Image (cartoon, rainbow, N blue to C red):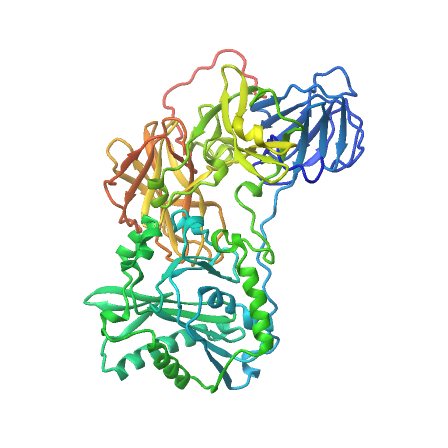
Amino acid sequence: MKQNLIVGIVIIVILTLGILGIIVLNQHTNPTSGILSQNSKLGNTHEVATDQGKVIVGNPKSSNTNKIEPQIELTKWNEEVKMKVNYDIKAKEVVADENSIIWKGDKQDLIYKQIPAKKETTLKKIPKPKIKLAQNTTKLRYIKFEPSDLLTIAASYELFEREQSDMPTLTSYVPDEDGYFFFGYRRAELDLRMPEQIKQPIVRLKADESTFGCPVIPFKKNGGFIMRLYYPDVKSQKGDLYQDKFIQAINNALKSKNINQIVYRQHDFIYYLDGIRPVQIGRIGADTNNIIFYIYTIEPFSTNLKDNIRMSMVLIDLALPSHDLKNIKSDINSSFRDEVASEFIKSTEFETSTSTLTDEEKRLLDGIKNLHKEKNWGILSERTDIPKSPSDEEKFDKFEFDILLHTKPESNIFTYNIETDGLDFFYQPELTENLKDKGNFQPENVANSYAVYKKNSTNVYDNILEAEKYKVGKVLHIYRPLITASNGKTTWGELNIDTKKNILTITVNKLWLENASYPVLIDPTFGYTSVGAFTQSIESDMSGTVNTGPSTGTATSIAAYIRGTGTTCDYIFGLYKDSDSSFIIGTSLSSFPASQTTQWYTLNLTNPTTISAIDYIIAVWSESCKSGNNAIYYDNVGVTRYISSPGTPTGSNWPNPGNFAVWDNKKISAYVTYGVTKMNLKGNLNLNGKINLQ
C-alpha cells in the first residue's frame, strides 16, 4: 500500500490481554516464521493466536491450499464465541507485504494488516544534574519575570532542567492574559467544554510522571501570581521542607500587612479557615526538581473563565470553594508576590542574587516554546519529544481489514458479510453535553460504535476461574469508521450492524465522496477487549450496575477496571440489594498507588456474606483526589442499569439505604466473585447402578 494512501476500511481486533500474538499457519498452508514480510508465501489461511483469542485470515474450509480468501474469523475463549467478517472483492492477485496481506482489485483493494499493541511506557525524564544537594552552593538566582504570557510561564518550567543547571533558581510570574493551565497529562476535554474552540490560551506544564494529571487551573489576567523553586532532587530530599517554607512566607507577608489570618497547606491545597470551612486560595506541588505554587488575588470562578469549565469541575469548587486573598484584605493584588518572595528568601540558607535570563537561556526558552505551541500539547497532552502513553484502544493487538478505493465508487454504502455465534451487539450513542459536564468521557471513535458482549453475560461468578476468564463478558468493540482521503481530509462513516441480515455496513457521505481526493480509505475498528469504552468519574460518587446472582453462595471479592490518575487516594467497593437499596457488604478502604495506572483493581470483602439469586448493585467509589480523575469504565448495554449516588463510604459507614438514581442501559466494568454454598445431606443415600468418574 502506498504510503500516501491514508483512507479505507480498517477492522482492528484488539486482543484482550494486549499481547502480540505468535503468528502460526494452518496445517494446510506453507509454514512461515514470525511476522509476515514482503513476498511471504501464502497458503489458504494465516493464523494469529494469543492467550484468549485467535484470528484466522482466510477460509480454513477452502479446498484450494494456495488461495487465501478475503475473510477474517475472530474467536475468543477457545472458540466459545465467534465472528466471521468477509468482503466480496474480485482480486486479480493476493500478495504479502510487511505484516499485511493485500487482495488487489481493479477499482479497490482489500488489505489485512496486523498492528502490535503498544506497551505502557514511562516518560523519559530529562537528565538531572549530577550534583547532590549536599554538594551544592548556597547561592540562589531570583528571576522575576515581568507580567508574562501563559506560554512563557509554561515553557520556562522546563528551562533549567534542560539546561542541567546546578544552581537553585527561584522564579515568579504574573500572568498578563486570561487562560487555562494544566499540569501533567490530563486531557483538556475532561475539564473544558470543546477546548479546541476556546479562544483563551490553554497551556500545559510537563510533569515527570506519565500518570500525573492535575485538573484545570483557570487564571485571570493579573489575577494572582505563580512562584517556582528549581532545585535538583528537591522533591525527594527537601520537598516538604520547602513547601512549608513557602506557606510560612505567605503568612509572614500577611502578618506584615497586619493580617492575622493564617494560611495552611494540606497536601497540594493552600487554604485558610472561614470559621470551620476551608477556603482554597491556591495550590502547591512538587515535581522531581521543582516546587511550584500559585495564589489567586482574583477568584477565577467569578469570571467568564467559568463559562468554559465543565459542571463536574464547578461542583468540586462548590465542595472546596476557590476564592482569593482579597477576601482576607481588599487591597491585596498581584504585587503581593514581591513580599512573599522576600519572606521565602529570608527563610532559606541561600545567598540570593537578582538575575535575568542569559542570551543562551533565552534561545533555549524559544526552542521549548516551539514544542509548547504544538496543537496537541495543550489539549491532548501529546508532544513530539515525549513518548506517548498508549490509549485504551492501543494497549491491545490490532488487525486491520481495509478497503482502499482507487476511484469514486458507484455506491456510498460498503457491505461486509458477517456470521456470529454467541454474541450480542449494543449500539453506543454519542455522549450528550450534559453527561460530559458530569465527567463522562468517550473517545471520538466510540461515538456511534458497537460494544459486543457474550450472550447472557453476567457480572457475578460462582468461581474465580470463570470470573477472571469472562470478567464482565465483553468480547470486542467495533469502533466508528474514519474515512480518509489521500490529501488528508477526513470524515466519519456511519456504522450499522444487522445480525438478522448478517451484514455490517458503512455509509459514507455522498457529497464527501464526490469531492474526495483518491485513493480513499474507510476505517472502522474491531477490537477484542474486556472493558467498557466510556468512562464516568467515581470521585466522591458511588457508581454501580445491577446484576443477578446465579445461585446461593458466599461473596468474597469485587473487581473493577478503573482509570486512576493523580496523587494517592482511597477507593472502596460494595454490594447493595437492588429491591430496597439496602447495604449488604463492602470492602475495606484501599489506596491507589502514587503512580496510578488504568487496570483491574480487586478488593476482598471484609466479611464474606451469603448472597442468593436476586438482583444486586455492584458499587464503586473513590475519594476526590483533586489532582487527578479516577473513573470507572462502562458501556451502554441492554437493559442493565447504571446507578449513581452521592455518598462517602468509609469502613462500615456506608450510606444505608443508598440514595440511587437510575440510568438505563449502562453496565460498568466491575464483577463479583463468590463461592457456591456447600450442601449438607442428612439421612440415607441409596445409589443404584454403576457410577463412572472420568
Locate residue 482 relative to residue 619 in the image: left or right: right
Residue 604 visible to an observer of this rendering: yes
Q: Quadrant of the N terminus?
A: top right
Which image quadrant for residue 251? Answer: bottom left
Q: In the image, is residue 98 above or below residue 236?
A: above
Q: Which residue is situated farthest in the left direction here?
A: 275
Q: Quadrant of the C terminus?
A: top right
Measured from the top left, where is residue 507 in percent x and y? 52, 25
- The residue depicted at 58 percent of the width and 50 percent of the height is 120
| Tally of marks | 0
Along the line of sight, the residue nearer the viewer: 606 or 411:
411
Q: In the image, is residue 609 above or below residue 265?
A: above
Locate residue 3 relative to residue 515 in the image: left or right: right
Q: Which residue is situated farthest in the bottom direction here?
A: 351
Along the line of sight, the residue nearer the viewer: 676 or 39:
39
Measured from the top left, where is residue 596 in percent x and y? 48, 54
Along the line of sight, the residue nearer the viewer: 665 or 357:
357
Q: In the image, is residue 227 above or below residue 177?
A: below
Locate residue 616 relative to residue 154 in the image: left or right: left
Which image quadrant for residue 241? Answer: bottom left
- The residue depicted at 57 percent of the width and 17 percent of the height is 692
Locate residue 224 relative to residue 99 in the image: left or right: left
Measured from the top left, where is residue 121 in percent x and y? 59, 53
Q: Which residue is situated farthest in the front direction here?
A: 515
